[in-house]
Image: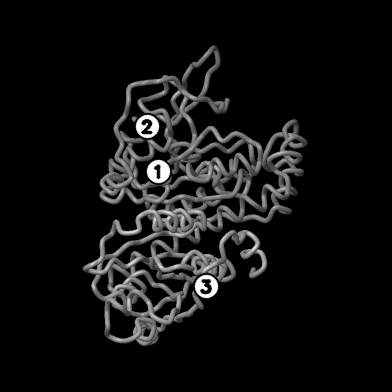
């Protein structure tokens, strides 16, 4: 009998690292691989077992720590030939359940353990951890490689969005830092149409649950949205890995894997309009928007604090990231930041005489940025800086120019 989705009662706390200290748990120990899917039924467990089979055939010591076949014939057939660590039987509220026997897997100490359903909540009393992801971290800490599966709705930062989209409560969640510490994340993809056909054929849920699933969580619109979430999450992971690689190796070339737009701001009138223009450019390019404010050596960071706070609020509302750097040479600061962060486009505001020009006295700053950015292969947009008249409606301005 499969364990229900339950929230366990309070128990003795188990100490795990914060996000910043997580490297000590995973990277110094076992190799961690996640098969990620949009929903149940895409084939995560099937692919995990196939990977286990390939490793077995190469002579790797692989065991099944816990795999839930859900009575699917193809999945059950793949389990043949694996050494399966016996499950721990647990009685809870008059019913008997089976959980992974963590201590038995640790004692067996294989090279690789296959552990299904990373987000699973353990039955109270079945072991020292409330969640299976905690069991997995202990296996990794012991030097055991782990291959596991996860649905996108169980990622902590996405769970609330999934609840709003689908109307279904997401009770089981995995912290983002745990997912991001995987050495490999592989997307198991399936189209919404294919998933609904698999559901109708009884390949995902038992017959009595099919009508409700198809009319609720497995609606086509939900499946499209969940698939998009999974694709975007994986794309973000790949992008972060690439940027980290480029920083680590001090790569000077510009890798245009996606558009990354940087807008440089001052406290000059019309900066809010500049930000909105840059946000529209970013949206059209489906890119990432960053905002940089350079504090010169003789300028006070607190000067015009109210104005900058309103700008920072606008930056947050636009979904961009705000950065402040101190440098007596704004052109150098902006282009250095752009190179380090693989920026593909820089957006600047023009004026007859900018505050930066007055501070620098060394020629128009825009011209210097264009010259330096050109050498780096970065495009530069110079936007006419316009201050909106009093009482002007920002929302209508945004609509008219979109």
Q: In the picture provided, is 292 more to the left or to the right than 313?
A: left
**Location of the C terminus (image quadrant):** bottom right
Q: Which mark is residue 36?
A: none
Residue 126 percent coordinates (x, y) = 42, 23
Q: Secondary structure at mark 3?
A: loop
Q: Secondary structure at mark 1?
A: strand
**Location of the N terminus (image quadrant):** top right
Quarter occupied by residue 253: bottom left
Q: Real-space Cα distance between discs 3 and 2?
A: 64 Å
Residue 188 percent coordinates (x, y) = 56, 54
Residue at 34% across, 43% down: 110
Q: In the picture provided, is 274 more to the left or to the right than 305?
A: right
Q: Do callouts 3 and 2 mark residues in contact (Cβ within 8 Å)?
A: no
Q: Count residues near mark 1 (Cα–Cα under 10 Å), then give few for <14, some for 14-19, many for 20+.
A: many
Which residue is tagged 2? 102
Q: Which mark is residue 386?
A: 3
Which residue is tagged 1? 113
């Amino acid at each position: 009998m499969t364990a229900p989705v339950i929230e366990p009662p309070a128990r003795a706390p188990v100490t795990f690292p914060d996000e910043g200290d997580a490297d000590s748990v995973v990277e110094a120990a076992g190799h961690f691989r996640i098969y990620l899917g949009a929903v149940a039924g895409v084939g995560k467990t099937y692919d995990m077992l196939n990977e286990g089979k390939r490793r077995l055939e190469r002579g790797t010591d692989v065991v099944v720590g816990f795999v839930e076949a859900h009575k699917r014939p193809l999945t059950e057939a793949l389990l043949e030939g694996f050494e399966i660590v016996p499950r721990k039987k647990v009685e809870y509220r008059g019913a008997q359940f089976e959980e992974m026997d963590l201590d038995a897997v640790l004692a067996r100490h294989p090279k690789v353990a296959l552990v299904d359903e990373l987000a699973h909540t353990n039955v109270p009393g079945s072991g020292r951890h409330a969640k299976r992801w905690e069991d997995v971290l202990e296996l990794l800490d012991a030097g055991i490689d782990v291959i596991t599966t996860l649905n996108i709705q169980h990622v902590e930062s996405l769970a609330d969005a999934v609840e709003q989209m689908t109307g279904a409560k997401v009770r089981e969640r995995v912290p983002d830092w745990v997912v991001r510490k995987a050495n490999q994340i592989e997307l198991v993809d399936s189209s919404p149409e294919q998933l609904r056909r698999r559901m109708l054929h009884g390949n995902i849920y038992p017959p009595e649950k099919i009508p409700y699933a198809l009319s609720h969580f497995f609606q086509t619109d939900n499946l499209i949205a969940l698939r998009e979430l999974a694709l975007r999450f994986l794309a973000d992971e790949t992008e972060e890995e690439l940027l980290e690689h480029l920083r680590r190796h001090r790569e000077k070339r510009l890798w245009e894997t996606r558009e990354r737009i940087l807008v440089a701001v001052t406290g000059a009138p019309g900066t809010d309009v500049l930000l909105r223009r840059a946000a529209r450019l970013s949206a059209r390019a489906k890119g990432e928007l960053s905002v940089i404010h350079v504090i010169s050596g003789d300028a006070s960071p607190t000067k015009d604090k109210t104005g900058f706070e309103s700008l920072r609020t606008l930056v947050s509302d636009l979904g961009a990231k705000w950065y402040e750097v101190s440098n007596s040479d704004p052109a150098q600061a902006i282009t250095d930041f752009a190179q380090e962060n693989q920026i593909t486009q820089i957006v600047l505001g023009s004026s007859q005489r900018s505050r930066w020009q007055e501070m620098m006295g060394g020629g128009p700053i825009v011209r210097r940025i264009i010259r330096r950015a050109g050498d780096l292969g970065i495009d530069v947009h110079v936007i006419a800086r316009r201050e909106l008249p009093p009482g002007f409606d920002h929302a209508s301005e945004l609509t008219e120019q979109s």
